[in-house]
Image: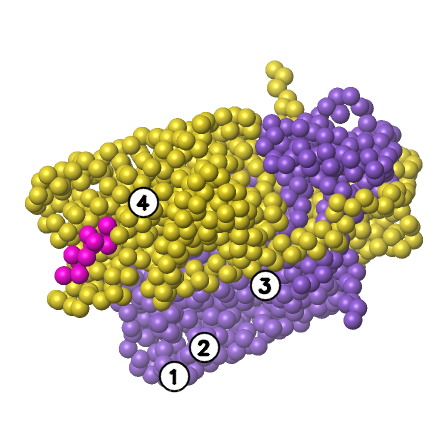
Chain colours: A yellow, B purple
Amino acid sequence: MARRRRSPSTRRSPLAPAWRRLVGRPLRAREASSEEITPVEGLSALSLDALTSVAYGPEAILVVLAAAGTTALGLVLPITVAIVVLLAILVVSYRQVIDAYPSGGGAYAVSRANLGARVSLVAAAALVVDYTLTVAVSIAAGVGSLTSAFPALAGSTVPLCLAILAVVTVLNLRGLGEAARAFLLPTMVFIVGLLSVIAVGLVHPLGRGEPPRGHPLVATQGLEAIGVVLVLKAFAAGLTALTGVEAIANGVPLFRPPRAKRAKRTELLLGVILGAMLLGLAVLARRFAIEPRSGQTVLSQVMAVAVGRQWAYYVMSVVITVVLGLAANTSFGGLPVLASLLSRDNHLPHLFALRGDRQVFANGIWALAILAAALLIAVDGNTNSLIPLFAVGVFTGFTLAQAGLVVHWWRTRPGGWRRRAVINAGGAVVTGISTGVLLVTKFAEGAWVVAVAVPAFVLLFIRIGAYYERAGRALRLGEIPARPHPRGSMVVVPVVSLSRLTRHAISEALSISDQVEAVTVVTADEPGGEERIQELQQAWERWSCGVPLTVLRTEYASVAGPVVRHIDRLRRRHHDQIVVLIPVAVPRQLRYRLLHNHLDLVLSAALRTRTDVVVARVPLEFDAGET
Amino acid sequence: MARRRRSPSTRRSPLAPAWRRLVGRPLRAREASSEEITPVEGLSALSLDALTSVAYGPEAILVVLAAAGTTALGLVLPITVAIVVLLAILVVSYRQVIDAYPSGGGAYAVSRANLGARVSLVAAAALVVDYTLTVAVSIAAGVGSLTSAFPALAGSTVPLCLAILAVVTVLNLRGLGEAARAFLLPTMVFIVGLLSVIAVGLVHPLGRGEPPRGHPLVATQGLEAIGVVLVLKAFAAGLTALTGVEAIANGVPLFRPPRAKRAKRTELLLGVILGAMLLGLAVLARRFAIEPRSGQTVLSQVMAVAVGRQWAYYVMSVVITVVLGLAANTSFGGLPVLASLLSRDNHLPHLFALRGDRQVFANGIWALAILAAALLIAVDGNTNSLIPLFAVGVFTGFTLAQAGLVVHWWRTRPGGWRRRAVINAGGAVVTGISTGVLLVTKFAEGAWVVAVAVPAFVLLFIRIGAYYERAGRALRLGEIPARPHPRGSMVVVPVVSLSRLTRHAISEALSISDQVEAVTVVTADEPGGEERIQELQQAWERWSCGVPLTVLRTEYASVAGPVVRHIDRLRRRHHDQIVVLIPVAVPRQLRYRLLHNHLDLVLSAALRTRTDVVVARVPLEFDAGET
């Protein structure tokens, strides 16, 4: 039976079909952008980062307070109230951002438009750091929730983190739109479930009486003076609970029209739910006298006391892991788009602007996955090691976005612009102060990493931008060049023996130029080399193809060397463009590829960086049949 | 100041200089073969594998005997005598091999000439297995010697093994000749030192009285029946001490003339020294009542009792490690040459026949290093796990070489051929029986691996040979082909913008053909894409280079896809050869390479397996200057 012959254009690497199945078929631009979302879907696609902060925000506050003694733990409630107030300010401010930039107003875009290119690079650098940390923190906290419920898994924290990261990466390589729908169910279960747990805890004033496990994470002493520094530190730690509230404003174009209206509704929804959760958890933590413990997160302790270690507890623990894993998605939706914008503005390599078959910026997704994996391995998957680094970048972005918006209102002056400007100015001041508090109180514990990384990224962006400008001048980009200057061309074809492949290559060479030369290399130590050459020369003469055959003899072992030196000699004699055509035998069966073309291997490598020669491979496909 | 401009032909990857320093400058064929060796140098270059067998051969015997009780340990002496007799037979036989094949008579060459191609492949497969095991066993035993003397190192057995393997690999990539000289000193120290230690032990009848450390490796019971099976097993284990005596016969061409005479002298020297060492160690093991122990090799125990744990003991321990590491060199001299012969006979991919700059078969060296590393990791660097696998391959080779030589004498019938044939026939019978004993007694303990691997390699060789034959027919190799069939050519140049690079590429394209078409891709979702295209079209018209510009629009994200589909359309319309010239900007500074040519990246990948299109990169080097 005749086997069906695939057309050459569909031939792919052997791994291609499996990869295709994993990430899906190519999408048209239209298909990708048609996946528009509703406010509720917006919660799962853009707000999970913010909502899931409840898994590490309250704990971060308690870790700081516990160090100052049991009494200090009582401060959790007033500090949480302060943070919820800040949340309200942010929600109001960002609803204004949505009005002002309905096409998506990330901190980078807003500050670029209003505060100038240099400042916008600071915002961009802060966002890059922030996105990477969000992925790492979310996944680490997710695994923390899992190991709290199932202590047997505690030994494999890092592998679990990397596995979740891999799943999220693949989901994002498929594209965000589909993902948003898949995230809807766990998001709803998480929101409804956690609010229910809090409600049960509030009704059942003493809880279901589950004794805490593990030993206290921080040695709590007795009474101690409660100073301003302590309050500030705890407040700064709690700010991590607010990360992610900006994501909706960035993602306005993803919503179904009327976009701005739906996005603003989502932002409000997020503020209400997140505020309720934070306050509820703070009340319960106080009432149950929760303190940070090893091997169990604060959220897990609250749930265990509120509803007991039964099915609801385990279901919620797994759901929290899932949504935290999915929260990392917010960053995967953000960083690649940011990288593509930076790349278009010449501040990152242009390859970040390339879309893949699925319309996503695959290179940005890979870059983020690699950065996050490195971070997770570095801190051994421990959430509390990442917390001091977190939020500095986020709040820098908040501050720049608000400040940019004040300038925007001042410049455009729409109706009620004064009120709007005041609101954003207030937001800028509050978030600016918060950024300062974060940086000062957390500097020694890890914020210095961010203080180094952000300027380093800014410097990188500036240097890449300067390089592209120089390269553009050197290449006279955009100028009308001189007329093209065609020369004759001289084609060199390296051959080993006489075969169909040789004929194919010589035919191609003659198609390109009248001046064709075949060359063959014989090394001094090749057994039977001279006989082979004599035979080849005789056969070549009998063939009489009209192309001369030059024999290159060498005392060295490399076969690429003599060809390169021969080309150098030709270049000195001829003015013509030299084209090297390397014949390549391509057996139809993939597994035989390794058996051919060792000459191509060494020659392509040797000529790869030659800028004065055009190198082309002339492939001939053939079928050697099966045994 | 004008900076010196390197010529394009000398430009290399940034790692090239460091690598060059590691493996040395390219050698001429003459230089490499001028490094001829004397008999004493022959001991270090070709016989270390055999000489260093004393580090694991006697121990292998004792491990078997210890299992049968303390009395059985007394059998070590008679068994060693039997093995030394076998050694004498092998030395006499192999001196005849040298006479018969002065150009180097490995088991593969001898059996190919006399026993036919199929049998020779069995020899080749046995040799491949043998070479790999020699490397692994030698290095593992070397590290064993080191950890015996310095127990603190016992935890890092595998890393130590891999480090030694890396050093040996690099030495061999530099070339064998130089290495032989470097090996001379440690070899001499080893031979003289070990013979001295044995002499001291024999003179000092009770030794220096060092108590043994570690616990017995095998639980020794009291008296037990000593059966034939036990004796055979111990004998088979001891055969590992004879591995490597064939290497001199393989390496005859390396000697200084008169080659055969010097090689025979070396073979005799090896036999005498190895026999003396084996007998001496057996006598001492008996006298000192040595038994196998954990954490300390038998050889190390003998030395410790003979001379005490003082400087001489430590020096010898380190020297033994060094020479065992160097013994692996025997295989690195052997396998790559064998692979190149197999490759020339079409039984391995042709790339194993390529010599590197240093005249060595670098691909074979790499393949051996990778196989040995895998083996060392698999057995955790434990010598005793490898011993049962070892020697089966070696003795298969011995048997085939001797049998082949009998046929050789029968065919050529020189003076005294009857006597010679009888000697080799005797050798063949004895080694044949030994092979059988090895396979039967060690089958369950690991010899089955070899019994599987050898046929698997034979099958691989046969299948590769059959494939090359089919491919040769399919490509009509060696036939005079039909006349070349030149066509017109049509050149497609993908462009993004107008620049010097564009002009360069269009010039090259016009040098090759009159039919040139520039194409540019705009994706549906590219921000400002339409404006970019309009500008480009206007500029293109003003340039009036004589080449039309085609705009390819796509709804998909991939920029490679539209170009590929456009080429497909062209191929349906034209009979001409299609050449794709991809313009490539090459900044002079390496670190900027990543910033350019993302188009080249995706297009080259997409067109890589197209056999109907000639793809060439047109590089233009430019200098964007420094900041």
Pair 1/4: label in front: 4
What kind of residue is marked 4? Ala
Q: What's the distance in space between the residues labelled 3 and 4, CA to CA?
A: 66 Å
The magenta stretch is A71-81
The lab-note entry on whether marks 4 and 2 share a chain reads: no
> Residue at label 1?
B310
Image quarter of residue A185: top left
Labels 1, 4: one chain: no
Is residue B285 visible from the viewing direction of this image?
no
Secondary structure of the residue carrying tag 4 is helix
Q: Nearer the viewer's eye, disc 4 or disc 2?
A: 4
Which residue was labeled with disc 4? A88
SS assignment at label 1: loop
**Which label number is shown at residue B170?**
3
Q: Earlier in the sequence, mark 1 or mark 3?
A: 3
Vertically, is B10 above or below A409?
Answer: below
- Dot 3 amino acid type: Val
Cα–Cα span, label 1 and label 3: 33 Å
Q: Is residue B173 left or right of residue A18?
A: right
Q: Which mark is residue B547?
A: none
Q: Please state the horizontal and vertical placement of residue B119, each as a whole percent of the image.
A: 59, 42
Residues at marks 3 and 4 on the same chain: no
Q: Distance between the Cα atoms at labels 3 and 2?
A: 25 Å
- How many marks can you see? 4
The correct choice, above or below, for A187 with respect to A56 in the image is: above
Picture coordinates of residue B236, whole percent (x, y): 41, 55
Q: Residue at x 33, y 37 (%)?
A: A268
